[in-house]
Image (spheres, rainbow, N blue to C red):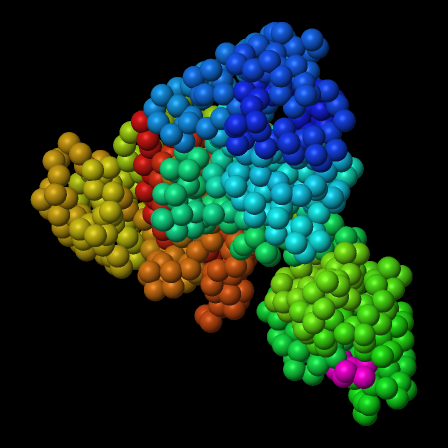
């Protein structure tokens, strides 16, 4: 199911603009208009300000109703108490879009939050798209620049940026990128997202032919499920999505709450959401720019086999380590390719070539010949040429020209890393490395170069992994509401828990609930010894902690004694009315213990956890998180990412156990979490994975109100 692309052309490429609150004395409105006019806008501009007759050599109108035409876009820069009226008037006039730069809404105080709610409702009522409020603006390099904080005219690129930080969007992302010749197609500061959201912009930008990659700076989202759906669709359809997500620390979370009023959400949840939808998480702004530049300039490689040629042996060794850390393959240089390189006298190499290839400084004189040999070898999917020489001298000019020619004629991505001198003696001239940077991506840091390579190979691998998996929209569509069948606001009894688990095909060990010692003995004999006895009481959910679980019971008399002991313990902790009885279960021997759980999350609703169970939970502290619902393949990846995968495949006391069977069970738990939203906590520990399949032997289920 494709998401409807919002009609945002009037925002990014308006033919006519009205600015309400237009004044040369206003930093935001004044500089926005200056930038709009200075950076090539050739449409109609209508200043609106009842306190002025003329500004920017144009008639100034008293209100939006007085403007002589229905404009494509209204920019709103007035005190917050007047914003709703301006947006309402614009919508009633038929204006399709409004850019609200005014601050003081939900990020400020209770009155601001009320105004923002009214603004959102008004936008929906009058049918107008609203950017913001509390945003710094937007730009389309092939359209209009509508921001007060853009110090130079944008050059058209193929990178789109959606930023929940206004200041970072232009004063950091844009300016830093422009300094190193990286250009954007679009930038939007989303502000408080009263109407249009990050997900709306991703949907729109993914459909634009001028956008090759989407960068997102995320602080928090009100609808993470929709974000996951649109990101999944964009990445499946060939548009990479790279994200910087802040809020990993408590300090960052507090700063975000005060800055935009957004909840950052559990970081493990975000990691899972990105992984499940093919979004690549990036640690910081320079990394985002370096990786995005690669996606904007190169077609995806066919695989992750990389050839590296370096003018420095030390740099070659460093790049080999960096490649290994990122899961990149470095196939040997052999056969005809190796013979061709060995025949080059300039390389001063004897015996054999390795990958990375140390071509020495002399190799810079024959870069085209080296490249011809490597590019002709089908063993490689991408190439890195590492130049550890000065980037500012006369020799650098020849090297730069050679590298530009190599990149242009290569069918596969060729990454250029230049680590030598960058500061020329003559500051009035552009040095050769900087001229080269204007035409191709050029990396100065080895780690960021290899991160960019890995980002492109991961794009291909992720797309291939997810090709046969159901889309996010398809997964969600099959989840139904089961909450009406559940008691609310308490821990469920064993019978209630077992009934819920059975609805989702979660296998539970055969269990008998008993109310006296003789019933317990009879149940034990029927099941066969040894057995386990455990308390069933919603008032005492953590029965192991109070000694209300007895294991290894091997006779009827022992069962009676265990029953009495459990009841005595329970009655010393709660009333008789709160006790359902004592459960009798067969004692499972062998297998691998796992833990499967569901925990509440303020942003994603709930998160599912899987990892080694039993005593290994605290010993290993090793688990993976998933955002429900998810596919069987997602579940298998999560299991394999923990020690549980190794425990199942390489069991000491028997043959390997099925990861597939446990993955199917994990999917069922995910479906439960997505369907039964009132389940606030679910703890299946342990789940025994045996040769006959996984089986739940203990369950704690708690519901919310």
* Apparent side of residue 491 relative to residue 400 in the rendered image (left or right): left
For the image shown, how many numbered marks are present on the structure?
Answer: 0
- Is residue 361 rendered magenta in the image? yes
Q: Given the current orientation, which residue lies at the most extreme left position?
A: 572
Tell me if 500 is positioned left or right of 414 in this view.
Answer: left
Relative to the observer, which residue lies in front, 573 or 318? 318
- Tell me, yes or no, if residue 682 can be seen here: no
**Screen quadrant of the C terminus:** top left
User: Does 103 sit above or below residue 540?
Assistant: above
Question: Where 115 falls versus 136 (above or below)?
Answer: above
The range drawn in magenta is 354-363
**Residue drawn where x is 44% and y is 35% of the image:** 260
- Residue 473: x percent and y percent? 61, 33
Residue 383 coordinates in the image, percent (x, y): 77, 67
> Measured along the vertical axis of the image, is residue 223 above or below residue 358?
above
Q: Quadrant of the N terminus?
A: top right
Residue 128 image point, x, y percent: 60, 16
Residue farthest along the bottom direction in this orientation: 350
Query: x, y (%) of residue 155?
Result: 74, 44
Say above or below: 519 vs 286.
above
Q: Residue at x 74, y 71 (%)?
A: 392
């Amino acid at each position: 199911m494709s998401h409807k692309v919002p009609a945002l052309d009037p925002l990014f490429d308006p033919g006519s603009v009205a600015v309400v609150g237009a004044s040369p004395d206003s930093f935001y409105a004044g500089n926005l208009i200056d930038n709009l006019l200075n950076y090539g806008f050739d449409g109609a501009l209508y200043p609106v300000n009842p306190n002025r007759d003329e500004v920017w050599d144009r008639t100034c109108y008293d209100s939006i109703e007085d403007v002589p035409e229905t404009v494509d876009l209204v920019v709103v820069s007035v005190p917050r108490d007047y914003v709703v009226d301006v947006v309402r008037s614009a919508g009633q006039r038929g204006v399709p879009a409004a850019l609200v730069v005014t601050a003081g809404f939900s990020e400020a105080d209770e009155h601001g939050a009320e105004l923002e709610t009214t603004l959102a409702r008004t936008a929906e009522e009058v049918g107008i798209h609203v950017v913001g409020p509390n945003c710094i603006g937007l730009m389309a390099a092939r359209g209009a620049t509508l921001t007060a904080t853009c110090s130079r005219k944008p050059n058209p690129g193929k990178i789109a940026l959606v930023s929940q930080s206004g200041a970072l969007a232009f004063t950091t992302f844009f300016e830093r990128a422009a300094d190193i010749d990286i250009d954007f197609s679009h930038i939007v500061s989303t502000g408080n997202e009263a109407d249009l959201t990050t997900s709306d912009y991703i949907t729109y930008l993914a459909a634009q032919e001028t956008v090759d990659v989407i960068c997102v700076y995320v602080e928090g989202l009100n609808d993470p499920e929709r974000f996951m759906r649109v990101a999944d669709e964009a990445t499946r359809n060939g548009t990479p999505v790279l994200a910087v997500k802040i809020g990993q620390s408590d300090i960052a979370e507090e700063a975000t709450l005060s800055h935009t009023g957004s909840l950052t959400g559990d970081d493990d949840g975000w990691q899972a959401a990105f992984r499940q939808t093919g979004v690549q998480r990036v640690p910081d702004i320079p990394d985002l720019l370096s990786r995005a530049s690669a996606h904007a300039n190169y077609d995806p490689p066919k695989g992750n086999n990389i050839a590296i040629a370096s003018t420095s042996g030390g740099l070659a060794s460093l790049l080999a380590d960096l490649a290994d850390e990122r899961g990149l393959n470095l196939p040997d240089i052999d056969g005809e390719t190796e013979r061709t390189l060995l025949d080059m006298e300039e390389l001063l190499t004897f015996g054999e070539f390795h990958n990375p290839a140390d071509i020495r400084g002399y190799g810079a004189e024959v870069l085209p010949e080296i490249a011809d040999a490597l590019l002709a070898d089908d063993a490689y999917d991408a190439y890195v040429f590492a130049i550890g020489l000065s980037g500012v001298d006369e020799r650098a000019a020849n090297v730069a020209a050679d590298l530009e020619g190599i990149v242009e004629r290569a069918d596969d991505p060729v990454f250029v890393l230049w680590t030598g001198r960058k500061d020329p003696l003559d500051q009035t001239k552009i040095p050769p490395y900087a001229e080269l940077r204007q035409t191709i991506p050029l990396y100065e840091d080895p780690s960021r170069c290899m991160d960019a390579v890995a980002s492109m190979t991961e794009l291909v691998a992720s797309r291939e992994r997810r090709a046969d998996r159901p889309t996010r929209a398809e997964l969600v569509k099959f989840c139904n509401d089961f909450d009406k069948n559940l008691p609310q606001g308490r821990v469920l009894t064993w019978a209630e828990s077992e009934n819920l688990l059975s609805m989702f095909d979660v296998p539970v060990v055969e269990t008998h609930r008993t109310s006296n010692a003789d019933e317990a003995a009879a149940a034990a004999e029927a099941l066969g010894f040894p057995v386990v006895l455990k308390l069933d009481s919603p008032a005492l959910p953590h029965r192991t902690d109070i000694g209300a679980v007895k294991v290894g019971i091997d006779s009827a008399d022992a069962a009676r004694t265990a029953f009495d002991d459990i009841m005595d313990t329970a009655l010393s902790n709660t009333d008789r009315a709160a006790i359902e009885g004592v459960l009798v279960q067969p004692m499972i021997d062998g297998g691998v213990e796992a833990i499967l759980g569901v925990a509440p999350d303020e942003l994603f609703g709930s998160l599912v956890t899987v990892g080694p169970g039993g005593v290994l939970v605290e010993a290993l502290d090793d688990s993976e998180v998933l955002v429900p619902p998810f596919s069987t393949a997602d579940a298998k990846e999560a299991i394999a990412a923990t020690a549980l995968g190794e425990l199942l495949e390489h069991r000491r006391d028997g043959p390997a156990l099925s990861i597939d069977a446990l993955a199917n069970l994990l999917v069922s738990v995910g479906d439960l979490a997505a369907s039964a939203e009132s389940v606030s906590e679910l703890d299946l520990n342990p789940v025994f994975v045996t040769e006959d399949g996984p089986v739940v032997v203990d369950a704690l289920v708690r519901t919310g109100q």
